[in-house]
Image: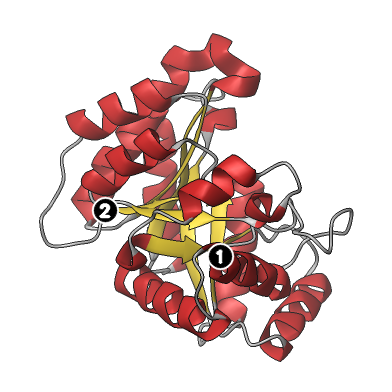
Amino acid sequence: MFDTHAHFEGSPLETETVLRHAAEAGVTAIVAVGGSPALNAGAIAAAAAHPESVRVAIGFDRDQATAADPEVWCETLWMLVRDQGIKPAAIGEIGLDYHYARETRHEQCALFAAQLRLADEWGLPVSIHTREADDDTLRILDEAPWRQDHPRGVIHCFTGDAPFAQALVARGFAISFSGIVTFRNADPLRAVAATIPEDRLLIETDSPFLAPVPKRGERNEPAYVRYVAQCLADVRKTSLAAIDACTTRNAQMIFG
């Protein structure tokens, strides 16, 4: 299995424990994802310690939108790559969230657009967060430059409706489902998951958040991505092995 979105901000010992649990559960690859200075540092450290199984995505999320000018954040990413000698697999996580911070909509959009331009310049896919911001997300994606020689990326932790998913797939993005798809009240989301084309389907944990059923209330970790995979197998009326195979293949196409 391939967990396409996990955060690492704990101690090196905690990271080692989480990665050992993942390997024991059959999770052979993980994208360690940034989003803030602390999360970027944790992702880089996890990938440096386990280059055989952990890829790294670095970026600045919507919560950083008012902390600095977008060009400053992009320069920060460039310096991370230069000074630490890393080769990121993606820019992320980036994107928009109007559920908690609609008042920073303008700043969020500016930061999102700037990092999409950087991803195009570097020839990298993106890992996008979008919540209650469908129209602006699609508008900014349509305005962004896109190379034809690299995957566009993934909409992580998808919670939208079927028309939004279809619009994103039409624009070349994969759709990733987290533990939310297992929640008791997630029937509409499970219905959407059943419709995603097989070659655009991904799984993730978004750990340490959003632990899936039956681990609700616990600290999430990549080992639990198998519960997301099993849920998708159930709603798509296929086998766990088939979900593992297609989502791993899709993740490898995007992240390497």
Most foreground residue, 242 or 221: 242
Q: Is residue 157 visible?
A: no
In the rendered image, the residue lying farthest to the top is: 103
* Residue 169 % position (x, y): 29, 48
In the rendered image, the residue lying farthest to the right is: 217
Rendering quarter of residue 168: top left
| Image quadrant containing the N terminus | bottom right
Q: CA distance from mark 2 to mark 1?
A: 23 Å
Q: What is the number of the mark on residue 10?
A: none
Q: What is the number of the mark on residue 232?
A: 1
Question: Which label's residue is closer to the chain start, 2 or 1?
Answer: 2
Q: Secondary structure at mark 2?
A: loop
* Residue 129 % position (x, y): 49, 40
Label 2: which residue?
152
Q: Which residue appears at 55% of the width and 57% of the height? A: 33
* Residue 100 % position (x, y): 65, 21
| Image quadrant containing the C terminus | bottom left
Q: Is residue 232 left or right of residue 74?
A: right
Instruction: Classify 46 as above or below 180.
Output: below
Instruction: Classify 190 as above or below 54.
Output: above
Most foreground residue, 183 or 6: 183
Q: Which residue appears at 74% of the width and 85% of the height? A: 20
Q: In the rendered view, how is the structure colored?
A: secondary structure
Most foreground residue, 21 or 159: 159
Residue type, label 2: Arg
Instruction: Classify 151 as above or below 72.
Output: below
Q: Secondary structure at mark 1?
A: helix
